[in-house]
Image (spheres, rainbow, N blue to C red):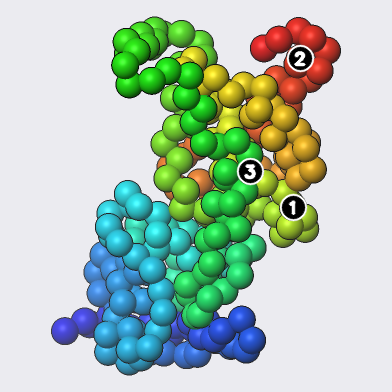
Amino acid sequence: MSELPSLHVRVWRGTPEAGDYAAYEVPRYESQTVLDVVSWIQQHLDGALAYRYACRVGMCGSCAMTVNGVPRWTCRTHVGKVAEDGNLEIGPLANFPVIRDLAVDMDPFFEKWVKAGGVFHAGATRDDPVAEIDPAAETRQIADAGIECINCAVCYAACDTVAGNPDYLGPAALNRAWTLLNDAKDTGRAAILEAVTGDGGCHSCHTMGSCAAHCPNGLNPLESIAGLKRAAARSFFGKGS
């Protein structure tokens, strides 16, 4: 049995039409994560609570929620680091339509990912030799710097520009576009630049830096977006990359 004081937890419950925070008392344990708290509520107090998770080890990103006002991976967030005087407030990710409770509709996020040119543009077939890429090449280093994005959407939820501009493609989509722009095997450079310089593209970024501050993988979409802006300017003035 836990000998620690109970947690006072408020969890968002509801649908797009109506909702509010519901209060729960949850036993506290050593090394307890926020996802443990949500799972305990669903298993012991309210079986109808809707939320997402899969791997529980920070590999899939599906358990991202808003914890005390900050978007986080709940599986990697220990209660001891975020509970304020034993209080937790857990809600769905911001900047997304809510399906129910803590589960949000990710479709707009992935639609923007594709709109930003985030799909690999192949120039070879399976019958062609495998392309040899120098791992020390500058473009390879740039591409590798942002490739660990797992589309958890924490950066999207944290982004003030997304909150104010629903057409903005968002940091994850633009980071992916920058990665492909620097992939020597991708043949869609012109298409990518056209996609990221239109309405809601890289020039809509206000450089607030929330994406970099909250990325659980330590990526810096802000640098990627700055790179897209430079590449777009060079392309416009006919200086290539």
Identify the element where label 3 is drawn: helix
Closer to the chain start, of discs 1 and 3, is 3
Q: Amino acid at mark 1?
A: Asp
Are the residues flagged by discs 2 and 3 in contact, CB closer than 8 Å?
no
Is 12 above or below relative to 46?
A: above
**Mark 3 sits on what residue?**
115
Left or right of 209 on screen, residue 6:
left
Which residue is rendered at x = 40% and y = 54% of the image? 61
Q: Amino acid at mark 3?
A: Lys
> Quick one: which residue is furthest to the left in this view?
1
**On the image, which quarter does residue 230 sit in?**
top right
Q: Badge 3 local density, few (<14 within 10 Å), some, or many (20+)?
A: some
Count residues near mark 1 (Cα–Cα under 10 Å), then give few for <14, some for 14-19, many for 20+: some
| SS of the residue under disc 2 | helix
Image quadrant holding the N terminus, namely bottom left
Looking at the rendered structure, the kind of residue marked 2 is: Arg
Residue ID at (34%, 69%) = 35
Label 1 and label 2: CA atoms lie apart by 25 Å
Residue 153 location (% of width, % of height): 52, 53
Quadrant of the rendered image containing residue 53: bottom left
Query: Would residue 6 be seen by someone viewing this image from the given angle?
Result: no
Task: Give the residue drawn at x 78%, y 37%.
Answer: 198
Of residue 159 and residue 30, the one placed in the foreground of this image is 159
Local SS, label 1: loop
- Which mark sits nearer the N-terminus, 2 or 3? 3
Along the viewing direction, whichever of 28 and 172 lies nearer the viewer: 172
Cα separation between marks 1 and 3? 11 Å
Q: Which mark is residue 234?
A: 2
Instruction: Write down the residue under mark 1.
Output: 167
